[in-house]
Image (tube, rainbow, N blue to C red):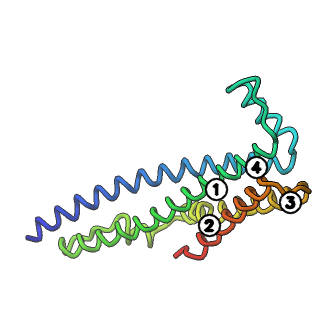
Amino acid sequence: MSGFKSEIIYDHYKETFQKQVKYLSQRNKYFILLLGLGAVLFFQLTNLTSINNLIEGLIQSNVSDSITLEVAFIHSFLIFTILWILMLYYQINRTISRQYKYLGKLETELSNILTPFKFEREGRFYKFHISWYERITKVIYAYLFPVFILFTVIVSGIINFRANNVLNLLTVFNFLIYGLIAIITLLYFIKRK
């Protein structure tokens, strides 16, 4: 019976680990996208006209010469895209954390069945034998990067608020997005463990 149980648990472990590899790949893609979008937003804050001209040039060269977009609309689209990808990024980070804990649980079950053999690659071993590089990378992914995005969005909101003397639908939409980004980032930090 224990042989059959260990096979089922090990098969489940392998499937879970394969999913984990996919999650890590997705997280890296979201990270690169957010880094690029955050950089565009940051440069938009520091040099508004040149980055907007660049974006308009890209749209006109890739879509149509006759399309002209307002700078405010481009900014709204940018921060909405950041919100969307940031939600996916936080969600995948949470999933990765939970999956590592679950893999550790499966390893413990396998180790108990296969005593004296210890099966502890993803759970216990990596938890207690983490390198400095891995610790720094974890801090970047989990803390510094979200703070960079949050800081950039807050500064963007302040600059937009000062620049916009008119309260219109687009301004309200932007501040709703700024607020949602701040809320999901704070919730991400609060529910970190």
Sequence order check, earlier mark of 1 and 4:
4
Task: Residue 188 in the image: state x and y as whole percent.
Answer: 59, 69
Sequence order check, earlier mark of 1 and 2:
1
- State if disc 1 and disc 3 touch (CB < 8 Å): no
Q: In which image quadrant can residue 67 be found?
A: top right
Question: In the picture provided, is 146 more to the left or to the right than 109?
Answer: right
Instruction: Out of 115 and 57, give the one closest to the viewer.
Output: 57
Sequence order check, earlier mark of 3 and 2:
3
Q: Which residue is mark 3?
A: 161
- The residue carrying pointer 4 sits among few (fewer than 14), some (14 to 19) or many (20 or more) residues within 10 Å by Cα, namely many
The amino acid beneath tag 2 is Ile
- The residue carrying pointer 2 sits among few (fewer than 14), some (14 to 19) or many (20 or more) residues within 10 Å by Cα, namely some
Q: Label 4: state its secondary structure.
A: helix
- State if disc 4 and disc 3 touch (CB < 8 Å): no
Question: In the picture provided, is 136 more to the left or to the right than 104?
Answer: right
Nearer to us of marks 3 and 4 is: 3
- State if disc 4 and disc 1 touch (CB < 8 Å): no
Quarter of the figure with the N terminus: bottom left
Q: Which residue is mark 1?
A: 83
Residue drawn where x is 34% and y is 57% of the image: 17
The amino acid beneath tag 3 is Phe
Q: Label 1: state its secondary structure.
A: helix
Q: Label 2: state its secondary structure.
A: helix
Identify the disc placed on residue 184. Answer: 2
- The residue carrying pointer 1 sits among few (fewer than 14), some (14 to 19) or many (20 or more) residues within 10 Å by Cα, namely many
- Distance from the alpha carbon under mark 1 to that under mark 2: 9 Å
- State if disc 2 and disc 1 touch (CB < 8 Å): yes
- Distance from the alpha carbon under mark 3 to that under mark 1: 18 Å
Position above or below: 19 against 117: above
Sequence order check, earlier mark of 3 and 4:
4
The amino acid beneath tag 1 is Leu
